[in-house]
Image: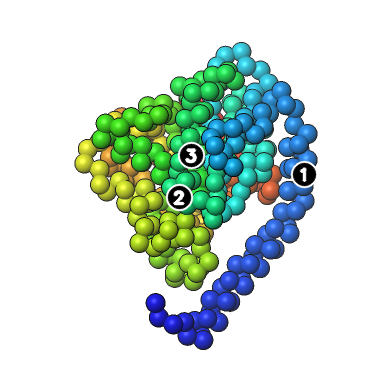
């Protein structure tokens, strides 16, 4: 590796300072919401919010389950995987999202998973697989319909779920059924994700944020980014996937953290490998930014119009 020049060093430090400053300012602005959210979480009725349910052996292998008040019939289920650039986030922070689902007759499972640097993408992927498997096998104990489990991910969560589904499809194509199967999944909803880590790394380089990005580190090196890129993995597919769940891809057109080209390319890649009877829908939300698809639900920044639009989409998919 070439020695860093003084100018390069200064540039790197400036980028690092800006990122730290942005995170500090964001964190300060979020303190009131954070406190209110935690108060609501810890005061939640244990009858309807089952906290810290163990789904695996890891330190962060816990999930929360939000149960509707009235459960006359089996309820549809949504399993949510949060974002946070693979290094931050917690199920408690999405308490209001879980509440929103349960108050509308949907069981919501919110998952914690191993974060970098305590685990690399292999471990994160394994955690997600265990959480999905646990939910499918156990949600009936909570009056959930194990045949109507929808997977929902935002940002890093969308990446990890798509990676899990694509790897599962590739394994099943080879005859390896494993634990849960694609046919167990009712639908997959991905919001604002990154799906080609190689091209996203180049995008980060242009913006000089690759220096502090955890993405290539969680891959254990730039040369391994392709192994965790659903779009690139799909290029090896020789035949159609017959059981891939109906997929709905959402992205804001003003997302600069993860540009919408990522979702467009995943849409194209999936459309090429599923049967015509399977749904692969792309929805680009004009003027929406990276977090707009989720923040209104958790009460951080409330926009009733955006929340109602997103809720209408989610409800129709999960309950159909």
Query: Which mark is nearer the camera, 2 or 1?
Result: 2
User: Looking at the image, which residue is at 48% across and 35% down?
Assistant: 130
- Of the pair 224 and 25, the residue shown nearer to us: 224
Q: Earlier in the sequence, mark 3 or mark 1?
A: 1
Q: Is residue 320 left or right of residue 88?
A: left
* Residue at far left of view: 238
User: Looking at the image, which residue is at 22% across and 37% down?
Assistant: 239
Image marks 2 and 1: residues in contact by CB distance under 8 Å:
no
Image marks 3 and 2: residues in contact by CB distance under 8 Å:
no
Mark number, residue 36: 1
Query: Which mark is nearer the camera, 3 or 1?
Result: 3
User: Looking at the image, which residue is at 35% across and 55% down?
Assistant: 226
- Of the pair 131 and 207, the residue shown nearer to us: 131
Q: Residues within 10 Å of mark 1 (few under 14, many from 20)?
A: few
The CA span between labels 3 and 2 is 10 Å
Where residue 76 sits: x, y (%)?
53, 24
Which quadrant would the N terminus be assigned to in this image?
bottom left
User: Looking at the image, which residue is at 27% across and 34% down?
Assistant: 173
Q: Which residue is mark 2?
A: 121
Where residue 79 sits: x, y (%)?
53, 33
Q: Residues within 10 Å of mark 3 (few under 14, many from 20)?
A: many
- Of the pair 105 and 217, the residue shown nearer to us: 217
Q: Is residue 14 left or right of residue 233?
A: right
Mark number, residue 230: none
Q: Earlier in the sequence, mark 2 or mark 1?
A: 1
Task: Name the element at disc 2.
Answer: helix
Determine which quarter of the picture holds residue 55: top right
């Amino acid at each position: 590796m070439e020695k860093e020049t003084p100018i390069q060093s200064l540039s790197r430090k400036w980028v690092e300072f800006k990122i730290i400053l942005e995170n500090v300012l964001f964190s300060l602005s979020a303190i009131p919401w954070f406190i209110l959210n935690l108060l609501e979480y810890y005061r939640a009725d244990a009858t309807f919010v089952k906290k810290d349910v163990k789904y695996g052996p890891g330190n962060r292998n816990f999930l929360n389950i939000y149960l509707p008040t009235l459960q006359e019939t089996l309820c549809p289920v949504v399993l949510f995987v949060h974002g946070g650039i693979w290094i931050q986030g917690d199920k408690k922070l999405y308490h209001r999202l879980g509440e929103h689902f349960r108050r509308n007759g949907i069981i919501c499972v919110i998952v914690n998973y191993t974060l970098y640097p305590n685990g690399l993408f292999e471990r994160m992927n394994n955690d997600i697989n265990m959480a999905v498997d646990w939910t499918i096998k156990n949600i009936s104990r909570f009056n959930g319909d194990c045949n109507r489990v929808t997977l929902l991910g935002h940002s890093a969560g969308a990446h990890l779920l798509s990676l899990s589904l694509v790897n599962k499809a590739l394994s099943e194509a080879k005859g390896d059924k494993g634990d849960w199967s694609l046919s167990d999944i009712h639908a997959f909803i991905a919001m604002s994700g990154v799906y080609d880590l190689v091209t996203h790394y180049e995008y980060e380089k242009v913006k000089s944020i690759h220096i502090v990005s955890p993405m290539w580190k969680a891959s254990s090196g730039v040369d391994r980014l392709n192994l965790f890129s659903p779009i690139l993995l799909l290029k090896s597919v020789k035949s159609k996937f017959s059981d891939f769940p109906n997929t709905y891809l959402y992205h804001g057109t003003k997302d600069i953290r993860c540009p919408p080209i990522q979702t467009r390319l995943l849409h194209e890649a999936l459309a090429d490998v599923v049967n015509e009877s399977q749904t692969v829908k792309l929805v680009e939300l004009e003027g929406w930014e990276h977090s707009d698809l989720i923040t209104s639900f958790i009460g951080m920044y409330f926009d009733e119009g955006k929340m109602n639009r997103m809720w209408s989409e989610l409800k129709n998919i999960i309950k159909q």
